[in-house]
Amino acid sequence: MKNNIIDISADFSFSFGFGENLLFKMKEGQNNISLKKGHVYGIYGGNGCGKTTFLNILNTFLKPTTGRVTFSFSAFNYIHENNLTNISKIIGNNIRRCFQTPLLTDELNTYNNISISKRLENESFFNTFSVGIKEKEDNEIAQLLEMVRLKGNENTATLSYGQRRIIANLQVLYSDAQLMILDEPFANIHQSVIEKLKQAYRKKVLQNNTTVIIVEHNKSSLQDFADAILTIEDKQISLLN
């Protein structure tokens, strides 16, 4: 449908090896799952159930063993080709990911670590660092930094783990991505800052019709934030509204 950003077929599954070691599949009786634009989706399940692997499929790093994951982006026609340049453009333009381990550049200060997360329409991820860092003040970055009480001139290499995770969230928030994938984004962050980040994500969702997919261990926190929750239990995926 036109308002969907991702459609997952009912025969979707992922296994390690040659299909012998099933990690998860759609729950029996579960129809196609459609993730809509302008919504927040949570992913919940026990340790080792495959939450991060599921994100890696949604992030196009992995392909399902059976079934299809269809994206609304026309550029995803390239995704099954062995073309790194095209794939990097697709991911750079339409998807942003907050990993469990923040991917920051220690040689850049906090301001510039955020600024490089917004790339030109046809600019690949690997060209990001060759075009130079924007020196012009960006009001949006300034507002994001002020929200978390940082100045922008901090030495990234000396940040605490919690502060690095905050910058990783700000990178995603600053981007123009249609799909924001967050893997336990709030670990080691103070609750007051978490609430501000959640509000900022919700604002993006409402203003830009962005879709957020978030993995969290705290189910009650997910229920307060997400419009619907995907659960992975007993190797089966189901959608709870």
Image (cartoon, grey):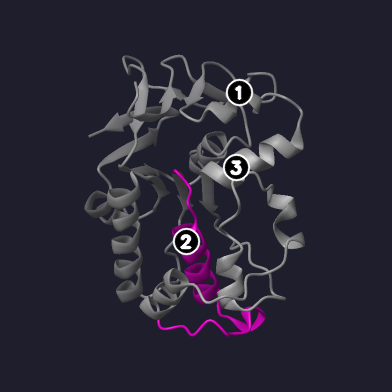
- Answer with mark 2 or mark 1, whichever residue precedes in sequence: 1
Which residue lies under the disc numbered 2? Answer: 174
Q: CA distance from mark 1 to mark 3?
A: 13 Å
Looking at the image, which residue is at 61% across and 38% down?
90
Q: CA distance from mark 2 to mark 1?
A: 26 Å
- Answer with mark 2 or mark 3, whichever residue precedes in sequence: 3
Image quarter of residue 82 = top right
Q: Position of residue 66 (x, y in %)?
A: 56, 16
Q: 47 or 38, which is in the foreground?
A: 38
Which residue lies under the disc numbered 3? Answer: 91
Q: Position of residue 22 (x, y in %)?
A: 56, 24
On screen, residue 188 above or below 32: below
Name the element at disc 3: helix
Q: Position of residue 181 (x, y in %)?
A: 47, 47
Which residue lies under the disc numbered 1? Answer: 77
In the rendered image, the residue lying farthest to the front is 136
Looking at the image, which residue is at 43% across and 23% down?
8
Looking at the image, which residue is at 33% across and 16% down?
31
Mark 2, other Cα within 10 Å: few <14 / some 14–19 / many ≥20: some
What span is in magenta?
149-178
Name the element at disc 2: helix
On screen, residue 115 above or below 63: below
Q: Is residue 117 magenta?
A: no
Q: Are marks 2 and 3 in contact (CB under 8 Å)?
A: no
- Answer with mark 1 or mark 3, whichever residue precedes in sequence: 1
> Which residue type does callout 2 highlight?
Tyr
Looking at the image, which residue is at 53% across and 50% down?
96
Mark 3, other Cα within 10 Å: few <14 / some 14–19 / many ≥20: many
Q: 22 or 136, which is in the foreground?
A: 136
Mark 1, other Cα within 10 Å: few <14 / some 14–19 / many ≥20: few
